[in-house]
Image (spheres, rainbow, N blue to C red):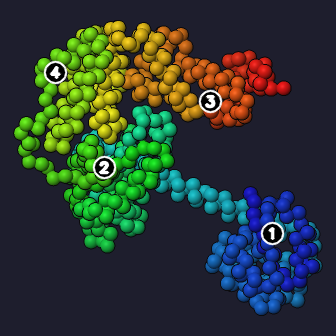
Amino acid sequence: MMYKLMVVEDEPLIRMGLKKYFEWEELGFHEIVEAENGSEGVDIALRERPDLIITDIRMPLMDGLEMIERLRKELPDTLFVIWTGYNEFAYAQRAIRLGNVFAYLLKPLQYAESIKTIHDCIEKLDLRREQQISALSIRKDLKDNMKLKRSQFVKQLIEDGNISTEIDVLSELCGINAEECSLQPFVLSYVPSSFPSPQSRTWWWQNAERILINVLHSYLGKGSDQQPLFTYQHHSKLYAFTVCGVDGEDKIATPILEECIQQQLTLVLQNEGAAPDVHLYVAVGQVTSDIQTLPSLLLQSDKALFQRFIPSGHQVFEIQPIAAEPVKGAAIPFSENDKIKLQSFLEQGDVQQLQQFMNRLAIDSQSKVQQLSLEQWLSFIQEIIAVAIRFAGKHGINMEERYHEKLIYLSFLDDFDSITALFEWITAWMIQLGIDSGESLRNIGTTDTAMFEQIEAYILQHIDQEITLQMVADRFFYNPSYLSRLFKAKLNKNYMTFVTEIRMEYAKRCLLQSNYAMTDVCLMCGYTSYKHFVKTFKKFTNMAPTEYRKQMGMMD
């Protein structure tokens, strides 16, 4: 372990001698600071916070013992050693008895005795540092364990919807009587600007809770730091609720999102989402003192996020009062005739007609979404998907085995924030469905070749990033297990080999450009370790990148 030493002595030559007397660096002291009297010693010690202070007793302005008295409370972890002569020995003994000094060094120094004192100090410092590390580790473990328990609690609320037997558990987890508190739910959601975004998912998992805390600071004030926060992260959403005492000063008011609050929260979301190029949305739920209503309020907050499909520019939503009967005639027309048309376009493999038809449905949806209930709009989307599922069944395609579960449970809606982008994605899946059915869609090409070419193009588009099988599966609508089997069956290689081959071919092209340094090529191909890049390149080409560049005439 490395420590910092401070020497306080009014005689410059003695200070210098003490600094040279021991091999301080070998003993573990990476830095030595000094002061010429107690008054200066107080100022410097408070700034530098040394681990060990060796000080003389008699000095001008302020003696060593007074300096120690001044510093003891401010530097509780610092060890003090008195540098004293025989005529001042009584002072040293008194200081040690009072508990302010760990040890003393007698003038003139006797190496064997004094080095033992220094080793005792180091042993004490080591023990104290280990105890601090252990205490920090214990506190972190307790905090992580509490966070996990709280997360499991929220998960149970969402999945089970019944907390009749959990009131005592909640009290234990939040540290106050849950029957005397108020709760407020929040749901934070992210939507990548391009689907899917390889980088944004990692960013989301690492930053979601921090972003929500920043939102709560803007909405509830700094007092929100003291309120227990329960969070559960699931895919693109972070479900949460805060807890505060009913009679406390931190009581939460029922959310009425005034214009200034909307702007504050929107600014936080826009700033947070700018760098990774994602859109962030938050739903602010209603406050309740009845814990039994919390599951339904969380789900209502979740549904409120669908308001993002209504063109308004808003990123912050609150639970809306239950609307009266929907406006008559507002429902989006999706007649039996439309269903027959969609089925026909799929059967015929008519991509152009299919795209035009889906574009018309998107326009209809956009024009009426604001007048519909959430259930009506979801039902409309469900009917469209149902036609495609029936087509798949007719052609012997097992939806659950082949395609992503998002398609079956409509959870793909969470990946979009505009109806245009949503319908483009559904249309692209239907075109892929036509390919998979064995139909020869016009202008598409052969089935297998076209699909793997599309996957290769997607990988090249994100070549400098980590691109997992799950990401590719999401992009092309497949179940990851099915896609993995497809690589082995059609290409006789696994997905990782497929990706690595693409990276190596791209590396060859980059190496032909002399303006790229080797390390640049490494990063451009998606490798963070140059050593691993060289090893992989050798495996696939039987030569190092430098040898390849030289062989191609790019180096002298």
- Indicate the secondary structure of the residue bearing disc 1: strand
Residue 314, horizontal then vertical, whole percent = 30, 51
Residue at image location 38% in from the left, 13% down from the top: 443
Which amino acid is tagged 3? Cys
Report which quarter residue 341 is drawn in.
top left
- The CA distance from mark 1 to mark 4 is 83 Å
Cα distance in 3D space between marks 2 and 4: 32 Å
Q: Residue at x 49, y 54 (%)?
A: 142
Q: Which comes sooner in the sequence, label 3 or label 1?
A: 1
Above or below: residue 383 compared with residue 217: above
Where residue 126 sits: x, y (%)? 72, 61
Upstream in sequence: badge 2 or badge 4: 2
| Up/down of 270 relative to 331, above or below | below
Closer-to-camera residue (65/329): 329
Residue 97 seen in this snapshot: no
Look at the picture and state if 87 lies above or below 520.
Answer: below
Q: Which residue is label 4 attached to?
A: 338
What amino acid is found at the position of numbered circle 1 in the picture? Ile
Find disc 2 in the rendering and name its residue: 313
What SS does tag 4 mark? helix
Q: Which mark is residue 32?
A: 1
